[in-house]
Every structure is written in structure tokens, then in C-alpha cells.
């Protein structure tokens, strides 16, 4: 058994058993690990994005990247199956390609897609992985998962600028994100968060040719999807 790996999982389990938060002294006492060693392991877990520190708090918290591992391990199929009827309704009502997206580390993973039946359309993105910055789905994921955004910054995966932070704040304020030919020329998208029992589980959105999807039309579609989900009372 590799001692450092064993100690790392012990620390994660202690934080989990303490409701998702524990202080360094408590972690060291419960684990039997020297405080300096525990601190170094916690520092590494923070750098990797599995543990975080909140401003003004001396505790260590589990991040959503940990829950993301459990989602990847076994929940994607169930999530996809439960949301496919929603995609069918979205595509039927908008006439555009719809998609489900989830986080995968620092990327957007398109879990499912349903293509428009129009002659000119955007193909289903199902199975694709794309960087989070810039895309509508990525903005939604970063807006409601700030630890993912902080992890991307800490890993130097993104040269953070004020424009991206403003986009994230705007996304959080209005409840949806737009991508008008930012990621790909002639492609426009809109994405909204999908919540169930108060927890954000995925991103729902539509994409299509920019000539057909003006900003005003995308906003109207976003509001229609928001009203549609609200009526489901999930």
C-alpha cells in the first residue's frame, strides 16, 4: 500500500464524515497524521481542485469535483435517460438541435444531443468535449460551479480576463448564457442550468446556424426553456 495515497483518501473521508468541512487540527487528530504532513496533502488536494478553502474560513471543504467523480462513475446513463424526453420537447418546440452537457474536469462534456430536422442545422454534439471558457454551456457550468472556475484559473488553463468574469456574472444574473459565433463561426447557442431538488445536475441548450438564431431569438428560447422547466416542478 502506498502511504501517501492511503493518507489522502483518509483525509477526504474525514472531511466527508464531518459534513463536508473540517479544520486542519481536527483532520490531523482523527487521521493520526502529523499536522505538517496533513497540511501538505491538503494543499495538494486544493491545487487539484478536490478540496477548497472559503474566504474567511479556516476549514477545508470538499469541492464539487469530488461529486463529479461519482457522476462520471455511474450516473451519466441515468441522467441522460431521464432528460431525453426534455430534449425531445425542446427540439420539437424550437426546431433546433438540443443538447445535454455536464462538467468533466475543466471541460464541457456533451452527454446527449437531438438534431433538428431542418435542412440546415447543427449536428448533435453528443460525445464531444470542449473547453469551458467561451461556450454557452461552459459559462453556465462555471457560473453555478465557482470552484470549477477557480480550479481552471489555478491550473493556468485560462488567461483570465475581466470579460470572462463579467460574462459569468451576467450568466448567473439572467439565468442563461449565449454564444453567438464565439466558439465557431456561423454557430449560435443558448444554454440554461437544469436543477433537480435544488441541485444543478446538467446544462440544457440549443444550437443552430447563426443566420437563423439572432440574439433576440436566443433570449426568447432561453426564457421559454426556463418557463418549461419551471412548469415541470422538478
Image (cartoon, grey):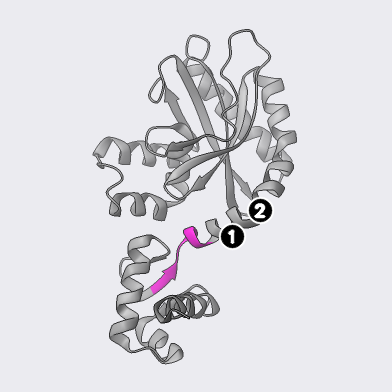
Q: With respect to residue 106, does 117 lie above or below?
A: above
**Of 171 and 136, the residue lying toward us:** 136
Query: How many circles with numbers are drawn on the protein?
Result: 2
Answer with the quarter of the image where residue 130 lies: top left
Question: Distance of mark 1 from mark 2, alpha carbons?
Answer: 7 Å
> Along the horizontal axis of the image, is 26 left or right of 117?
left
User: What residue would you read off at disc 1?
Assistant: 70
Q: With respect to residue 11, does 157 lie above or below?
A: above
Answer with the quarter of the image where residue 133 lies: top left
Q: In the rendered image, is residue 234 in sight?
A: no
Spot occupied by residue 138 in the image (x, y as percentages of width and height): 45, 39
> Along the horizontal axis of the image, is 104 left or right of 40?
right
Answer with the quarter of the image where residue 53 lies: bottom left
For the record, the magenta segment spans: 60-66
Q: With respect to residue 157, does 192 lie above or below?
A: above
Residue name at image x 61 percent, y 22 percent: 97
Spot occupied by residue 60 in the image (x, y as percentages of width and height): 39, 73
Residue name at image x 59 percent, y 60 percent: 70
Q: Return the mark for residue 75.
A: 2
Q: Secondary structure at mark 1?
A: helix
State which tag comes first along the sequence, 1 or 2. Answer: 1
> Along the horizontal axis of the image, is 84 left or right of 166?
right
- Contact between marks 1 and 2 (CB within 8 A): the answer is yes
Q: With respect to residue 93, does 133 lie above or below?
A: below
Q: In the rendered image, is residue 105 in sight?
A: yes
Residue name at image x 38 percent, y 81 percent: 23
Amino acid at each position: 500500500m502506498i502511504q501517501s495515497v492511503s493518507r489522502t483518501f483518509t483525509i477526504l473521508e474525514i472531511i466527508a464524515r464531518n459534513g463536508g468541512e473540517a479544520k486542519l487540527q481536527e483532520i490531523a487528530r482523527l487521521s493520526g497524521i502529523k499536522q505538517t504532513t496533513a497540511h501538505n496533502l491538503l494543499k495538494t488536494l486544493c491545487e487539484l481542485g478536490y478540496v477548497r478553502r472559503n474566504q474567511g474560513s479556516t476549514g477545508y471543504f470538499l469541492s464539487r469535483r469530488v461529486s463529479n467523480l461519482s457522476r462520471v462513475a455511474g450516473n451519466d446513463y441515468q441522467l441522460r435517460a431521464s432528460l431525453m424526453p426534455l430534449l425531445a420537447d425542446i427540439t420539437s418546440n424550437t426546431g433546433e438541435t438540443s443538447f445535454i452537457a455536464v462538467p468533466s474536469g475543466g471541460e464541457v462534456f456533451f452527454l446527449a444531443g437531438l438534431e433538428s430536422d431542418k435542412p440546415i442545422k447543427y449536428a448533435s454534439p453528443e460525445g464531444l468535449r470542449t473547453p469551458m471558457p467561451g461556450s454557452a454551456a461552459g459559462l453556465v457550468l462555471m457560473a453555478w460551479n465557482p470552484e470549477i472556475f477557480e480550479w481552471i484559473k489555478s491550473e493556468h488553463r485560462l488567461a483570465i480576463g475581466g470579460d470572462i468574469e463579467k460574462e459569468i456574472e451576467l450568466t448567473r444574473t439572467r439565468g442563461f448564457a449565449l454564444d453567438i459565433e464565439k466558439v465557431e463561426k456561423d454557430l449560435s447557442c443558448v444554454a440554461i442550468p437544469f436543477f433537480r431538488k435544488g441541485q444543478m445536475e446538467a446544462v440544457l441548450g440549443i444550437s443552430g446556424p447563426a443566420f437563423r438564431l439572432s440574439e433576440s431569438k436566443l433570449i426568447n428560447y432561453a426564457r421559454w426553456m426556463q418557463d418549461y422547466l419551471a412548469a415541470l416542478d422538478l
